């Protein structure tokens, strides 16, 4: 903690957020919409609506405190000078999405650590340290005799405990010990979810560095690809990459998922744990981990997609001059990344096409007709049709249908669309069925779909009037996708 290092550290987004003039607004809003519900990302329209509600209530208590609009605040928080939020666009979407940066989450977590805790467990942490030390030494011991000796000691302890249980002597944790370990469990779970944003940020940095190399490199395609693939393999083979691969493999195992659910349900059913009033973090922990891991997988696959597009660029040699100009523009843009022009009109473009006006294309002069206005009072009429249908619109939530598919595939490797409609009856008829087909034709990081157009099935549902309807369509099977390597 040297003076110059701390002086430079003041430019870190975490420090800037804590020192911001509106830090109470920013941190409280981020905690309520991102941390508490564990939301990985939010659409701009949804985030603007939540921020407008927050500003409305705060302005009643603190008049003239926050004069800007919700959109203006989000723009300030997501710009490069602050970097409190990450603004990005997903594929096939024109609406921006926002997510917390790891720096903002660290500042919120640090402020939470300042809260005075009524109960601080020390015994469980010390026992955890002892257990980790034993595990490290046991797994790194290369002498078979020493390993056998340690295992025999453990076996003797287990046999002694079995003998005590057979004699009716039951030794269990008291209420204090159970609470202490449960609080440590919640803290570890929150820390694990918080680490995912940093892991995702690390992969995004790899993606950005790769794009910069492509823009600035003057090497031929073969040498550049060797360098890029070498770095990508190095990231996948790093400690962080291997750890994430092992985590994703455990999380995608059906047996581990079932064991995880059973353990959480049994722990939450304990009377000592119920007295702690746990929140919704642990019951939904598996889904939070799946969502966070899926975002990391999508970020990692973005680098592969960038390389694929680079390989598919067939005009690289045919239009070398154009590519050189584009690289110069890209390199100049990267140079000006931290020094944007201050003037609003800093450049202009000439017309991209000629403006041609043919004399004969003009229409002949026609005198304007004067409207004749009748001197009569208008009377209110009545519609001759039923206008209720104009308001009976319904919306198909594709994310909800995707979650129903994921839930159905938790305990089985595949399910047909017909079986899925029997478990989750169609509520919005043919529109909902078409949405299922749209999901089946799209790529997904969790599920795959097989469409057999040669085999047809009948699917039925009941409309709002209770009339049963049928449709004949291809046979669709949804399957659970196996875990992918980051490489």
Image: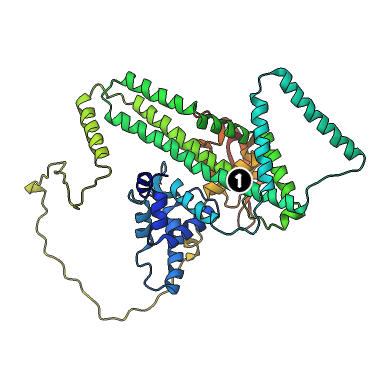
Name the residue at the left extreme: 359
Residue neighbourhood size for the residue with mark 1, other residues' Cα within 10 Å, grouped as few (<14), some (14–19), many (≥20)? some
For this rendering, which residue is in front, 142 or 77?
Answer: 142
Q: Please say if 218 is above or below 428.
A: above
Q: Position of residue 207 (x, y in %)?
A: 39, 34
Q: Please say if 14 is above or below 445.
A: below
Residue 374 in view, yes or no: yes
In what quadrant of the picture does the N terminus appear? top left
Q: Which residue appears at 49% of the width and 54% of the height?
A: 108
Q: Is residue 170 left or right of residue 401?
A: right
Q: Position of residue 39 (x, y in %)?
A: 52, 50
Residue 331 figure quarter: top left
For this rendering, which residue is in front, 442 or 12?
Answer: 12
Q: Position of residue 49 (x, y in %)?
A: 44, 61
Residue 438 in view, yes or no: no
Q: Is residue 8 left or right of residue 345?
A: right
Q: Which residue appears at 43% of the width and 66% of the height?
A: 55
Secondary structure under badge 1?
Answer: helix
Residue 26 figure quarter: bottom left
Q: Position of residue 409 (x, y in %)?
A: 64, 38
For this rendering, which residue is in front, 345 or 360?
Answer: 345
Which residue lies under the disc numbered 1?
189
Q: Is residue 245 left or right of residue 323?
A: right
Q: Which residue appears at 61% of the width and 39% of the height?
A: 417
């Amino acid at each position: 903690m040297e003076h110059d290092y701390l002086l430079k550290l003041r430019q870190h987004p975490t420090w800037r957020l804590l020192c911001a003039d509106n830090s109470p607004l920013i941190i409280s809003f981020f905690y309520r919409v991102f941390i508490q519900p564990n939301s990985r990302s939010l659409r701009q329209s949804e985030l603007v609506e939540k921020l407008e509600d927050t500003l409305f209530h705060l302005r009643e208590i603190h008049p003239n405190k926050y004069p800007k609009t919700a959109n203006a605040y989000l723009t300030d928080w997501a710009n490069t000078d602050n970097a409190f939020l990450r603004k990005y666009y997903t594929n096939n979407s024109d609406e921006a999405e926002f997510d917390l940066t790891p720096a903002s989450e660290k500042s919120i977590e640090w402020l939470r650590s300042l809260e005075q805790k009524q109960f601080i467990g020390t015994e469980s942490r010390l026992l955890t340290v002892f257990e980790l030390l034993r595990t490290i030494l046991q797994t790194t011991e290369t002498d078979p005799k020493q390993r056998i000796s340690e295992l025999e000691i453990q076996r003797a302890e287990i046999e002694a405990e079995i003998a005590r249980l057979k004699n009716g002597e039951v030794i269990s944790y008291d209420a204090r010990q159970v609470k202490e370990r449960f609080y440590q469990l919640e803290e570890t779970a929150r820390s694990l979810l918080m680490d995912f944003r940093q892991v995702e940020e690390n992969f995004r940095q790899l993606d950005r560095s790769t794009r910069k190399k492509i823009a600035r490199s003057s090497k031929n395609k073969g040498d550049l690809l060797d360098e890029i693939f070498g770095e990508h393999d190095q990231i996948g083979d790093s400690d962080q990459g291997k750890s994430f691969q092992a985590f994703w493999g455990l999380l995608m195992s059906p047996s581990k998922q079932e064991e995880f659910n059973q353990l959480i349900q049994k722990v939450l059913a304990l009377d000592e744990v119920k007295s702690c009033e746990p929140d919704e973090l642990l019951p939904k922990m598996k889904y939070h981990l799946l969502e966070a891991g899926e975002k990391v997988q999508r970020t990692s696959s973005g680098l592969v997609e960038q390389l694929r597009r680079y390989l598919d660029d067939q005009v690289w040699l045919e239009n070398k001059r154009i590519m050189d100009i584009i690289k110069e523009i890209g390199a100049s843009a990267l140079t000006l990344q931290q020094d944007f022009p201050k003037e609003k009109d800093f450049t202009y473009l000439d017309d991209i096409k000629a403006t041609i006006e043919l004399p004969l294309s003009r229409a002949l002069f026609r005198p304007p007709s004067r409207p004749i206005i009748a001197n009569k009072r208008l009377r209110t009429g009545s519609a001759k049709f039923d206008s209720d249908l104009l308001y009976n619109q319904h919306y198909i939530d594709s994310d909800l249908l995707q979650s129903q598919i994921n839930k159905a595939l938790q305990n089985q490797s595949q399910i047909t669309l017909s079986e899925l409609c029997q478990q989750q009856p169609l509520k919005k008829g043919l529109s909902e069925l078409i949405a299922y087909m749209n999901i089946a034709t799209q790529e997904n990081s969790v599920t795959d779909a097989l469409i057999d157009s040669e085999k047809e099935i009948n699917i039925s549902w009941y409309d709002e009037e209770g009339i049963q309807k049928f449709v004949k369509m291809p046979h669709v099977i949804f399957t659970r996708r196996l875990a992918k390597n980051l490489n």
